[in-house]
Image (cartoon, grey):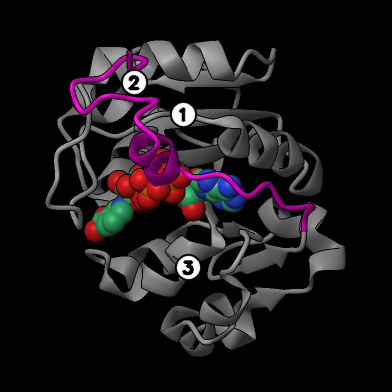
Amino acid sequence: MNEGLPYMRPGRVVGLLGGSFDPAHEGHAHISREALKRFALDELWWLVSPGNPLKSRGPAPLDQRMARARAVMDHPRVRISDFEARAGTRYTAETLQALIRTSPGVRFVWLMGADNLAQLDQWQDWRWIMEHVPVGVLARPGQRIAARNAKAADIYRQARLHGYASRLLARGSAPRWCFVNVPMVDISSSEIRARGLWTTRGGVGA
Ligand SMILES: Nc1ncnc2c1ncn2[C@@H]1O[C@H](COP(=O)(O)OP(=O)(O)OP(=O)(O)O)[C@@H](O)[C@H]1O
Ligand SMILES: O=C(O)c1ccc[n+]([C@@H]2O[C@H](COP(=O)([O-])O)[C@@H](O)[C@H]2O)c1
């Protein structure tokens, strides 16, 4: 049972971009295209979260966030998935365990923007994540210093792969992570919400 995700042959490399996507925007699409190239991914799956465990405010309804995500990211190698809601997982470590169980032999890479690297040490079982899944981090405006000072980056400094070798990220075993300095797109979901372009009940604002 793969909870709605496609069958992937063992050995294929799948990047996972988890997020609230409340709403999805061009920044997500941009880092996805960059990640496909920079980390030599075969596919990339957006995991539209039922809700970030660290955020107190609940996001817009999942079906509306999924619909917006599909409209923003139309790419033959990117899939938009509600795997976490289907599998009943919320924490990333649990989600990764479920994915590894359902897709044996597939090489997963966890992807995130630099802001999330700075907070990674607050995630549930974050060391398990680092020890089991390679992590690709993409530059985000204003987050360079926070990412550089991240506790996770310091603890796992020996496991860091240089940006120029990013295409090898999934070719070795964890712990292994890589920060890539991609061109940056300065946009966030919170800014879109603040401008009233996405209502808290979902959908495009009036
Ligand atoms: N403009 C961007 N540049 C780089 N990474 C980004 C960008 N926007 C989002 N990301 C990354 O995409 C993932 C999902 O992001 P998320 O859905 O939380 O969007 P967000 O814009 O960060 O939302 P919010 O403003 O509500 O925190 C996270 O890993 C985040 O770091
Ligand atoms: O597992 C955790 O403890 C955890 C804590 C915070 C965030 N995450 C995940 O990080 C991803 C980005 O979250 P967000 O809300 O910043 O888009 C999303 O997949 C979340 O489920 C996971």
Distance between the alpha carbons at the discs numbered 3 and 1: 20 Å
Left or right side of 42 for 102: left
Residue occupied by mark 3: 117
- Amino acid beneath label 2: Arg
Confirm or reject: label 1 Cβ below 8 Å from ligand 1. Answer: yes
Dot placed on the residue nearer the N-terminal end, 3 or 2: 2
Please state the horizontal and vertical placement of residue 53, each as a whole percent of the image.
Answer: 18, 51
The residue at the point 60 percent across, 39 percent down is 27
- Amino acid beneath label 3: Leu
Mark 1–mark 2 CB contact (< 8 Å) = yes
> Which is in the foreground here, disc 3 or disc 1?
1
The residue at the point 29 percent across, 34 percent down is 49
Circle 2 Cα neighbour tier, 10 Å, few/some/many (<14 / 14–19 / ≥20): many
Which is nearer the eye, 126 or 142?
A: 142
Secondary structure under badge 2?
helix
Residue occupied by mark 1: 24
The numbered dot on residue 65 is: 2
For the record, the magenta segment spans: 182-206
